[in-house]
Image (cartoon, coloured by chain):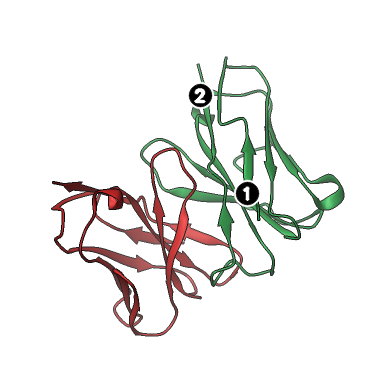
Chain colours: A green, B red
């Protein structure tokens, strides 16, 4: 079974540019989560999809961030325009059930975003 | 809010035992997780505690005391491959969401 895959693994962009991160969850997992780790800080929740619907986007930093999951399969996270403080590692996770509590959540390797 | 504390770094010798402590203060509690993360790789699940006590899984054990807001991860018979970051995470009242500590970097030396 393929794991959660994220693309790209690294991205370096200039302040003001746009970047789109992609996450392919494990096949059959309806629940998809985005998390972010900025330098020296802990991993923080951004949002949660159930299929194509946003269940909780309380962790999204501001309206420069837009997440989509059209068709309920892969998801994209767009940052537009990017700012220096957006640099960090963006993780995606997926789970079959609507509960990450337990053993069901699987994480991707992350996308390291550097804004210069 | 969530407040999860764990040491930043620990160093131990191959074959030894290391205990990583984690204290938490969270709004709601639906279990405590430990994840292992090697540099550049995905966090991988190690253990889950929702009741007080010790859960043992091979060389790794995890303990929870809900009344004290305290957990530890015990790594026995350390191997070089155990050098990694260990993340303590709590499932809060919304049990689809994890709150993480900053992670403990464990370095195993020969």
Tell me: B13 left or right of B28.
left
Identify the residue position indicated by label 1 in the image: A4
**First in sequence: mark 2 vs mark 1:** 1
Q: Residue B48 versus residue B80: which sits nearer the camera?
A: B80
Q: Chain of mark 2?
A: A
Q: Residue A110 versus residue A85: which sits nearer the camera?
A: A110
Q: Secondary structure at mark 1?
A: loop
Q: Chain of mark 1?
A: A
x, y (%) of residue A34?
Answer: 62, 48
**Mark seen at residue B74:** none
The picture quadrant where one finds residue B32 is bottom left
The picture quadrant where one finds residue A97 is bottom right
Q: Residue at x 52, y 61 (%)?
A: B98
Identify the residue position indicated by label 2 in the image: A114
CA gap, disc 2 and disc 1: 22 Å
x, y (%) of residue B37?
Answer: 40, 49
């Amino acid at each position: 079974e393929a794991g959660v895959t994220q693309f790209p693994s690294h991205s370096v962009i200039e302040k003001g540019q746009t970047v789109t991160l992609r996450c392919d969850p494990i096949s059959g997992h309806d629940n998809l989560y985005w998390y972010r780790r900025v330098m020296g800080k802990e991993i923080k929740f951004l949002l949660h999809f159930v299929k194509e619907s946003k269940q909780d986007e309380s962790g999204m930093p501001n309206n420069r961030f837009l997440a989509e999951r059209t068709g309920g399969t892969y998801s994209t996270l767009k940052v537009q325009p990017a700012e220096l403080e957006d640099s960090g590692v963006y993780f995606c996770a997926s789970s079959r059930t609507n509960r990450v509590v337990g053993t069901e959540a699987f994480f991707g390797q992350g996308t390291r975003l550097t804004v210069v | 809010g969530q407040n999860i504390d764990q040491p930043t770094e620990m160093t131990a010798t191959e074959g030894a035992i290391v205990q990583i402590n984690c204290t938490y203060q969270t709004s709601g509690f639906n279990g405590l997780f430990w994840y292992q993360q090697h540099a550049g790789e995905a966090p991988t699940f190690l253990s889950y505690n929702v009741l007080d006590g010790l859960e043992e899984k091979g060389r790794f054990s995890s303990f929870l005391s809900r009344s004290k807001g305290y957990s530890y991860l015990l790594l026995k018979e350390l191997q070089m491959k155990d050098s990694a970051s260990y993340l303590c995470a709590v499932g809060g009242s919304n049990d689809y969401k994890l709150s993480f500590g900053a992670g403990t970097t464990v370095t195993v030396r020969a």
